Image (cartoon, helix red, strand yellow):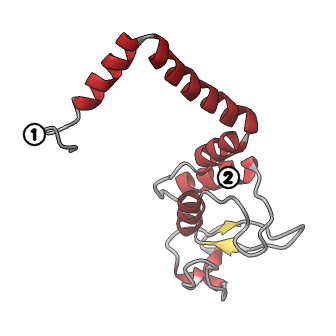
Amino acid sequence: QGGVWWKTLREDDPISLEPLHKLRYEPFNLAAGEGIATFFDPRMLANYLVSAANFTHPLNRRALTRDECVALDAHLVVCRVKPVGVAEVFEATARAADPAVRIATLRAQAAAIMESFFNPAAASAGAAAAAGGRKKGGRNA
């Protein structure tokens, strides 16, 4: 669609409740379902998704896809709106939800604790590094 087609919209942004026709840039269509257009202020939508790290459609709670997040990031660039890394946060959230990643993180933490039992020099070095972040008088910064 060309020009400023959204100036004829009478809907409000579902997040900010501001009229979409007042936007200085093109709204983003995040479909609510097959053939069901739902327009959002792309800046508000991106910030909402990233701040909540909850990648579900704001109106019907369907899971968003990585492709939709990439499309939103690209739309922000086209609109000359500062991108916030929607796809990047989507991917990080997906990795964090992966049980294998969580298990690997817990194993690494446990291994570090075990190392401190069997290698006191490493534990002392870690304690010294932690003490370096304290103010005079031995109190935490």
16 vs 48: above or below? below
Question: What crowding class fits label 1: few (fewer than 14 Cα within 10 Å), some (14-19), or many (20 or more)?
Answer: few
Foreground pick, 102 / 11: 102
Residue 59 in which image quadrant: bottom right
Please indicate whether residue 35 sits to the left or right of residue 97 in the image: right
The amino acid at mark 2 is Cys
Foreground pick, 137 / 39: 137
What residue is disc 2 on? 69
59 vs 138: above or below? below
How far across and how far down the image is residue 8, in percent? 65, 85
Residue shown at the point (63%, 26%) measured from the top left: 107
Between marks 1 and 2, how big is the CA–CA gap?
Answer: 49 Å
Residue shown at the point (62%, 70%) measured from the top left: 27
What residue is disc 1 on? 137
Residue shown at the point (46%, 55%) measured from the top left: 82
Label 2, secondary structure: give it.
helix
Foreground pick, 137 / 82: 137
Q: Quadrant of the C terminus?
A: top left
Res 74 label: none
Q: Residue furthest left?
A: 136
How far across and how far down the image is residue 1, in percent? 71, 66
